[in-house]
Amino acid sequence: MADAASPRGSSTTRGTRAFPEDRLVDFYRTMVLARSMDERCLTLQRQGRIGFYVPLQGQEAAQTGAAYALAAEDWVFPAYRELAVALARGVPLQRLFDQFIGNAGDDLRGRQMPNHYGYREFNFVTASSPVGTQISQAVGAGMAAQRRGDKIATIAFFGDGTTSSNDFHAGLNFAGVFNTPTIFFCQNNQWAISLPRERQTRSETLAAKGTAYGIPGVVVDGTDVRAVYQAVAEARRRAVGGKGPTLIEAQVYRLGPHSTSDDPRRYRTDAELAEWKEKDPLALTKHQLLASGTLTGEADETIWSQAKEQINGALAAAEATPPVDPLTMFEDVLGQPTARIQEERAEFEAMLRAGVLKQ
């Protein structure tokens, strides 16, 4: 079995769909924005300005390539690390910061953990902490679309550790039986928190797990944005064409901690990290752009500086946004509030005004 620090390049499939070369700079720009925001959010959590964060460093190419291969009408079922997917789908930076902070601009009104966001207008379902739950949901949504005759795909993002969960196996079984238009996108970042990939399965690849359910499995180099785009585009073509689901294993590496509650130095070596840093997807993409003459060093510096300016502006606006109104706790439960709920709301509001309760 291969070492956790080494990509299984010999089994990598690069896909068959054409890559839009004229958009590679845009892909890179999204990757830079994701990396810059990721670094800033880690700092914000350490400063106590947001409560929790799950980084994605090293997985930007996998997420960006996958997201841009989808159509706007497709439904995304993320885990809790899909920042680049959200950015590629068009979610504004301030909306993300609003959720991280939990202010009045937060669509979820502070009722979810930081970094667990969702946006109806972007067909981006709210993330949840338990691993694998989004897989069954993606399959169910795919079955619904199938029965309505909607030519869309659903995609579930998850990590290597999730392939050992009940929902993974139940979801793939249903998808295989009902031939749902679902893409299972596994970001194999080699570590399920502190458990290495080799300690949780004897499968040669994670993509091979689809065979038991009659689902084709594809292994792709997750540091290669072109390869990921091609693999997901082909999987989407199969899905909307009635050919059923596909399991994609994007082999990547988590360069940072699992979350801001984790210290990866306790379970992985500096040598392993150094080896994978040589495969940093941003560095690889930048090198390709510079080598082809599509990007100059000066233009690259501008992309990074513009990303940081965007982040600074969005963060300032989010931090200037007032807290969530406590009266909103009586909303979003029933379409029409009952008389009892209205009475309780009035009592609560009176206590706030009297100073019995403080906001």
Image (cartoon, rainbow, N blue to C red):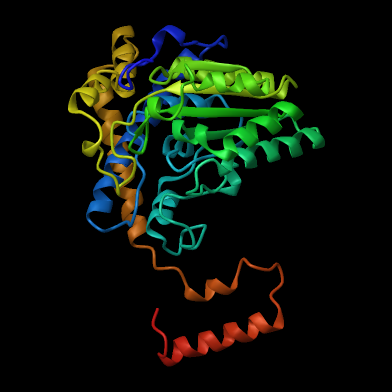
Q: Position of residue 1 (x, y in %)?
A: 38, 15
Tell me where residue 337 sits by quadrant. Answer: bottom right
Whole-percent x, y for residue 247 in the image: 58, 23
Residue 177 shown left or right of residue 76 in the figure: right
Residue 248 pos. (x, y %): 54, 22
Task: Mark yes or no: residue 153 visible.
Answer: no
Q: Residue at x 58, y 19 (%)?
A: 233
- Quick check: can you spot residue 119? yes
Q: Residue at x 45, y 64 (%)?
A: 104
> How many numbered circles does the render carry?
0
Is 185 or 280 nearer to us in this picture?
A: 185
Vertical placement of 314 versus 307: above or below? below
Image quadrant where one finds the C terminus: bottom left
Q: Is residue 58 above or below residue 340?
A: above
- Which of the pair 282/22 is nearer the observer? 282
Q: Position of residue 303 (x, y in %)?
A: 30, 29
Judged from this view, the residue extending furthest toward the bottom is 354
Residue at left offset 64%, top offset 21%: 212
Task: Name which residue lies at 25% across and 58% down.
Answer: 48
